[in-house]
Image (cartoon, grey):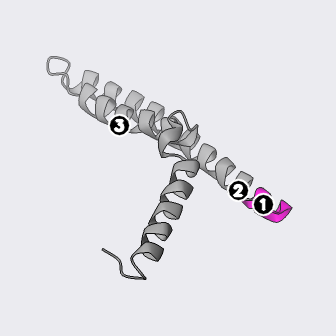
């Protein structure tokens, strides 16, 4: 079953994608500048004890996953998967006569 979107729906879907991409680039920019700042603080205050790589690593993992989601690198969990899952659950509900299990 294919869904035919109106022009208005297509516009809102495209707008949402642009907002997601913009959010990713904001996150990436923050990641770069904050971590440069943290590296500077770490090297200035305690160069013998390096800790800057911890926030760099964990936040970096988050940025990577954010990018994978925004740019739909793994479409298995994208919009198509969501629509298929919704249809599957609706069919189960019909089969169970309106009783959710």
Q: Nearer the viewer, mark 1 or mark 3?
A: 1
Mark number displayed over residue 28: none
Q: Which comes before the other along the chain, label 1 or label 3?
A: 1
SS category of the residue bearing label 3: helix
Q: Is residue 64 magenta?
A: no
Mark number displayed over residue 5: 1
Report the number of discs.
Answer: 3
Residue 80, how many percent across, how many down?
Answer: 58, 49
Q: Which comes before the other along the chain, label 2 or label 3?
A: 2
Task: Characterize the local packing of mark 3: few (<14), some (14-19) or many (20 or more) Cα atoms within 10 angstroms.
Answer: some
Chain part drawn in magenta: 6-12
Q: Which residue is mark 2?
A: 13
Q: Which comes before the other along the chain, label 2 or label 1?
A: 1
From the viewer's perspective, is 25 left or right of 94? right
Give the CA separation, mark 1 to mark 3.
37 Å
Q: Which residue is mark 3?
A: 59
Q: Is residue 101 above or below residue 16?
A: below
**What secondary structure is the stretch in magenta mostly built from?**
helix
Task: Characterize the local packing of mark 2: few (<14), some (14-19) or many (20 or more) Cα atoms within 10 angstroms.
Answer: few
Q: Residue furthest right?
A: 7
Residue 34, how many percent across, how many down?
Answer: 41, 36
Q: Is residue 9 magenta?
A: yes
Q: Nearer the viewer, mark 2 or mark 3?
A: 2
Q: Which residue is drawn at the image coordinates 43% and 73% (left, top)?
A: 95
Task: Characterize the local packing of mark 1: few (<14), some (14-19) or many (20 or more) Cα atoms within 10 angstroms.
Answer: few
Circles 2 and 1: CB atoms closer than 8 Å: yes
Give the CA separation, mark 2 to mark 3.
28 Å
């Amino acid at each position: 079953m294919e869904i035919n979107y109106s022009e208005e729906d297509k516009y809102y879907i495209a707008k949402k994608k642009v907002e997601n991409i913009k959010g990713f680039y904001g996150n990436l920019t923050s990641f770069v500048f904050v971590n440069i700042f943290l590296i500077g603080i770490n090297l200035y205050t305690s160069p013998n004890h390096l800790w800057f790589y911890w926030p760099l690593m964990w936040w970096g993992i988050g940025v990577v996953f954010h990018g994978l989601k925004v740019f739909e690198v793994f479409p298995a969990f994208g919009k198509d998967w969501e629509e298929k899952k919704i249809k599957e659950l609706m069919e189960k509900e019909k089969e169970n006569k309106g009783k959710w299990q």
